[in-house]
Amino acid sequence: MTVDSSAASKPRRGAASRAGSAGAKRTTRTTAKKSADTELVQLLTPEGKRVKNAEYDGFVAGLTPDELCGLYRDMVLTRRFDAEATALQRQGELGLWASLLGQEAAQIGSGRATREDDYVFPTYREHGVAWCRGVDPTNLLGMFRGVNNGGWDPNGNNFHLYTIVIGSQALHATGYAMGITKDGADSAVIAYFGDGASSQGDVSEAFNFAAVYNAPVVFFCQNNQWAISEPTEKQTRVPLYQRAQGFGFPGVRVDGNDVLACLAVTRWALERARNGEGPTLIEAFTYRMGAHTTSDDPSRYRHDDERLAWEAKDPILRLRRFLESANHADEGFFAELEAESEALGKRVREVVRAMPDPDTFAIFENVYADGHALVDEERAQFAAYQASFADAEGGN
């Protein structure tokens, strides 16, 4: 991706010169786009057609029809869970929710590439990866309701608690990977983060430590094009995967809406890590179809035509087309999956509505060991504010 610099401080040029320059810029953009398309690893087109790739085909060559249908099932159920959580937030049952809509292939493909003894460090949006690691989806919701700080034992599934601080999990993953190397373990670590986190210092530090110590870690960046309201081209002048070169390890850009490509590339990267070949950066080029979180309004900073263009690349529809064309799945399979999806949605609703209400005063606890006058004052102000609602209801 090229970024045009301002020419305001340069002498004026003639019309012919300006036209020539504009043509050069258009050519540069076209060349950059063709280069990016060439560099993108893709095994399944948006139309559901299988694309041969000599380098990565071997990592998915053994997939059976049942396993391919399993990947489809994973994505469908993850999307349904995500949609249910979004609806529950809108109904006031959750305080916040970060949707993964559109990123199912990146998460399911990479998640299914991990082994049981690998360790995963997520952000706060990896609901599909959590599904692959065997974490009950309802356990993800307590934190977003405000009733716990994480509803699962990280060591039970080798899946760390969600990390809200942007980019810090990359350092946690690198340190853990350095530790398992010292232990002599035959396992790998994968750290998830978004394109926005790639601008954080913690991520650069993690890259450097991982490279210098040859840590068995895969950095999986889900480039969904928008760091909240900031587009990727405002963060970097080169594709994100190329940043790995400056730290001395390989980077790969994969079609993040292609579950087969994500599975193959992540298997390759994890195998490198286990073989002592060090870290890899994977940039899954995908798109965030919904809002950054339920507190965000994407219509304020991006156009609908952009979203519509990415809807044509939908990861679930893509795999369904492939399954149907290859006769790997029939209408009975899809109908059964629809019923399973409905049952999952019902269970999620029931579990969330049975959860206790959050303790609204817990925010004031454990700030200072011996208490603090300012915190006491703020607690009293908040108590008065809460009481005003009761007074208003009583007056009515």
Image: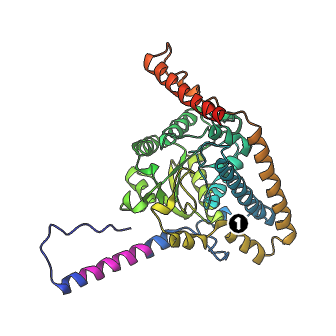
In this view, the residue in front, 364 or 179, is 364
Which residue of the protein is positioned furthest toward the left in this rendering?
Answer: 11
Q: Which residue is mark 1?
A: 61
Locate residue 331: give its quadrant: bottom right
- Where's the N terminus, which quadrant? bottom left
Please say if 368 is above or below 83.
above
Locate residue 10: give its quadrant: bottom left
Residue 91, given in percent of the width and then of the height, sits at 67, 48
Please say if 326 is above or below 291.
below
Residue 147, given in percent of the width and then of the height, sits at 66, 33
Q: Which residues are magenta?
A: 20-33
Say which element carries label 1: loop
* Left or right: 241, with 345 as reference point: left
- Where's the C terminus, which quadrant? top right
Q: Residues within 10 Å of mark 1 (few under 14, many from 20)?
A: few
The amino acid type, in three-letter code, at marker 1 is Ala
Magenta segment's dominant SS is: helix
Residue at (45% x, 16% y) in the render: 372
Residue 293, given in percent of the width and then of the height, sits at 55, 51
Q: Does the segment drawn in magenta span residue 205?
A: no
Which residue of the protein is positioned furthest toward the top in this rendering?
Answer: 370
